[in-house]
């Protein structure tokens, strides 16, 4: 499969759409530093995420499954409800990822994240998973120690392939699994996902180099986690998606 640069060229193609939106967080805990030199993917407002052509990318017969990651703060703000409303999706299922690692939080420290499943409102009533034994909790250690900001488990690709038919596309992709189309500034041209490397700190997403992170260096990893867990990411000079997207809000 291939890296996509213009989504409009693939409208009406996919039966599986997978995305981890770069949610914009207005409030940050005190003392957090700016990570613009570490992660240049940028953040997107709710209106900009809602402007993504999710419905248009889905197959015209409406047999399309959409899988979207959402954090608990965004769930409390009903952000998932708003974007699903614009995309004309119905929230039908969800999966909880247990990262097995304590994260941030002003009260309870977060250890989980939610993958929401949506289908078109006008989807056939018999639109179900390809298998009926997939459980709603995934216990996989977080890859945060690898230095990849907000990275998700690579095992998710196999899980989604087992429950959703193709063609498949990932938006805001950071690797290129075989059999998938990918889209985003960090999406590589070559097929493959490497768990042991990460973009070099401060490097360009288009000209990145890979460096290894020693898993036993606990002090270094702890320092990095304290940065990536709370720092506000700022918008780059150009939008964090190829070609840019505009909508009726002018976002």
Image (cartoon, rainbow, N blue to C red):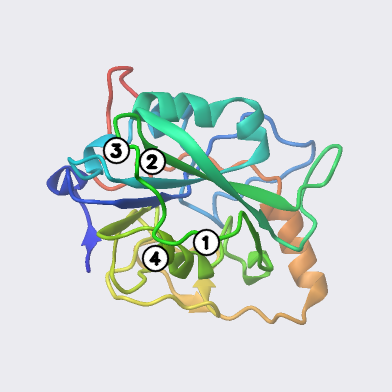
Is residue 214 positioned above or below 162 on the image? Answer: below
- Secondary-structure class at tag 3: loop
Dot 4 falls on a residue whose secondary structure is: helix
> Would you say the residues marked 3 and 1 are in contact, meaning their CB atoms lie under 8 Å apart?
no
Mark earlier in primary sequence (4, 1): 4
Q: Give the spatial CA distance, label 4 vs label 3.
A: 20 Å
Question: Which percent across, then down, holds residue 183?
Answer: 30, 55
Q: CA distance from mark 2 to mark 3?
A: 42 Å
Above or below: residue 208 compared with residue 58: below
- The crowding category of the residue bearing disc 3, from other C-alpha atoms within 10 Å (few below 14, some 14 to 19, many at least 20), is few
Cβ–Cβ under 8 Å for marks 2 and 4? no
Quadrant where the N terminus lies? bottom left
Q: Position of residue 79 (x, y in %)?
A: 54, 28
Left or right position of 105 against 189: right
Residue contact at pointers 2 and 3, CB within 8 angstroms: no
Residue 65 visible in the current orientation: yes
* Labels 4 and 3 touching (C-beta < 8 A): no
Q: Answer left or right for 105 relative to 10.
A: right
Disc ID at residue 161: 4
The residue at which mark 3 appears reads as: 124
Q: Is residue 153 left or right of residue 247?
A: right
Which numbered disc covers residue 181? Answer: none
Q: Sequence order check: which comes first, mark 2 or mark 1?
A: 1
Residue at image position (18%, 50%) is 13
Q: Residue furthest top?
A: 249
User: Which mark, residue 202?
Assistant: 1
């Amino acid at each position: 499969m291939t890296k996509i640069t213009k989504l409009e060229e693939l409208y009406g193609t996919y039966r599986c759409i997978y995305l981890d939106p770069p949610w914009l967080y207005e409030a940050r805990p005190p003392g957090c530093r700016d990570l613009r030199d570490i992660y240049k993917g940028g953040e997107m407002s709710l209106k900009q995420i809602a402007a993504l052509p999710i419905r248009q990318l889905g197959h015209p017969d409406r047999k399309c499954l959409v899988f979207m990651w959402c954090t608990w703060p965004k769930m409390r703000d009903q952000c998932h409800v708003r974007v699903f409303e614009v995309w004309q999706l119905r929230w039908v299922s969800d999966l909880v990822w247990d990262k097995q690692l304590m994260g941030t939080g002003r009260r309870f420290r977060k250890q989980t994240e939610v993958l929401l499943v949506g289908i078109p409102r006008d989807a056939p009533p018999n639109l179900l998973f390809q298998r009926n034994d997939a459980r709603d909790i995934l216990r996989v250690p977080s890859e945060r120690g690898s230095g990849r900001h907000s990275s998700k488990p690579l095992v998710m690709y196999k899980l989604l392939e087992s429950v959703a038919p193709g063609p498949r596309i990932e938006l805001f992709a950071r690797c290129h699994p075989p059999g998938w189309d990918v889209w985003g500034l960090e999406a590589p041209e070559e097929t493959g996902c490497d768990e042991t490397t990460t973009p070099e700190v401060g490097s360009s997403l288009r000209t990145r180099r890979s460096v290894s992170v020693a898993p036993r260096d606990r002090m270094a990893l702890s320092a990095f986690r304290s940065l990536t867990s709370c720092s506000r990411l700022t918008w780059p000079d150009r939008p964090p998606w190829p070609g840019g997207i505009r909508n009726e809000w002018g976002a």
